[in-house]
Amino acid sequence: MLVLGIETSTPQSSVCLATEHGLVASATLGRGRAHGEFLTPAIAFCLQHAHTDIAAVSGVAVSLGPGLFTGMRVGIATAQTLAHARRLPVVGLASLDLLAYPVRHVRRLVCSVLDARRGELFWSFYRAAPGGVQRVTEFRVGPAGKLAGEIEAVPDGVLCIGDGAVAHRALLESTGAEVGSAASAFPLAQSLVELALPRFIREDTQRPEDLLPVYIRKADAKIGWRNRGALYGGTSGAGPRAAPTRT
């Protein structure tokens, strides 16, 4: 089956088309145009270079955050619109889970860290599991010093990845943690589709209107999504259950 993946929860946006046999087409944009300006042309680009059209897509996978409010709104709204128009199933996954997935083969504890703005970070810890990664903590938000304290309390070695980790490299490395490179700083649509495909195959999917952005801050949960027209609400706390995230 052909799945469209949409990841717009961070300053880097990505879109891809993939099947159970691998990647078909992808497009990625770093810090540049707004998510909304990138997304529709990127989907068209992937379809064109895959020599197919939207009618061939069997499902839509989308990142739910945590992340940037505008990016989450654009990505989820686009996924909902496409799914409603084509009557497609959807799968939503958390951005921190997607960030951890490409480093699933390391033996150390992995900490996914994203810039939450306002001088704070989003993070969660993961361990390798058969076929993927297992989230071992809830999603958290706070200053870099709070994360550093958590890392210091961990007896095992820790690999920190994500733009939040890169931005606070010196502090996190002072705890003994290793910090990944900028190449692994953002979640990718390809990881999203790889994780979502088994759910599509076993029909463990969602209705478009049930896609809920992952909120960590209480203040974010008070934003009027219903008044925005395109979305249907939000969650607070740890977000939707996504562990273990396995293929």
Image (cartoon, rainbow, N blue to C red):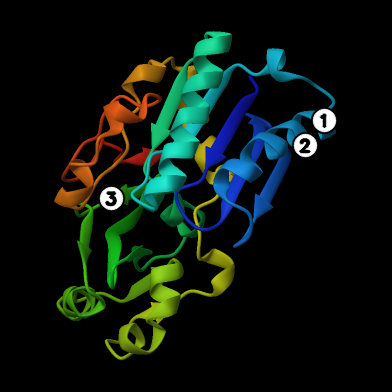
* Quadrant hosting residue 140: bottom left
The residue shown at (14%, 77%) is 153
Residue 12 visible? The answer is yes
Q: Amino acid at mark 1?
A: Gln
Secondary element at tag 3? strand
Label 2 environment density (alpha carbons within 10 Å; few <14, some 14–19, many ≥20): some
Report the number of discs. 3
The residue shown at (56%, 20%) is 82
Q: Going by the image, does 47 lie left or right of 60?
A: right
- Residue linked to disc 2: 45
Secondary element at tag 2? helix
Answer with mark 3 or mark 1, whichever residue precedes in sequence: 1
Q: Amino acid at mark 3?
A: Arg
Q: Going by the image, does 111 lie left or right of 237?
A: right
- Residue linked to disc 3: 135
Position of 54 relative to 13 (above/below): above
* Quadrant hosting residue 33: bottom right
The residue shown at (61%, 29%) is 4
The residue shown at (57%, 35%) is 5
Image coordinates for residue 35, horizontal then vertical, percent:
56, 47
Q: Are marks 1 and 2 in contact (CB under 8 Å)?
A: yes
Q: Amino acid at mark 2?
A: Phe
- Residue linked to disc 1: 48
Task: Residue 166: give its label.
Answer: none
Residue 23 visible? The answer is no
Label 3 environment density (alpha carbons within 10 Å; few <14, some 14–19, many ≥20): many
Image coordinates for residue 28, horizontal then vertical, percent:
66, 51
Position of 50 relative to 146 (above/below): above
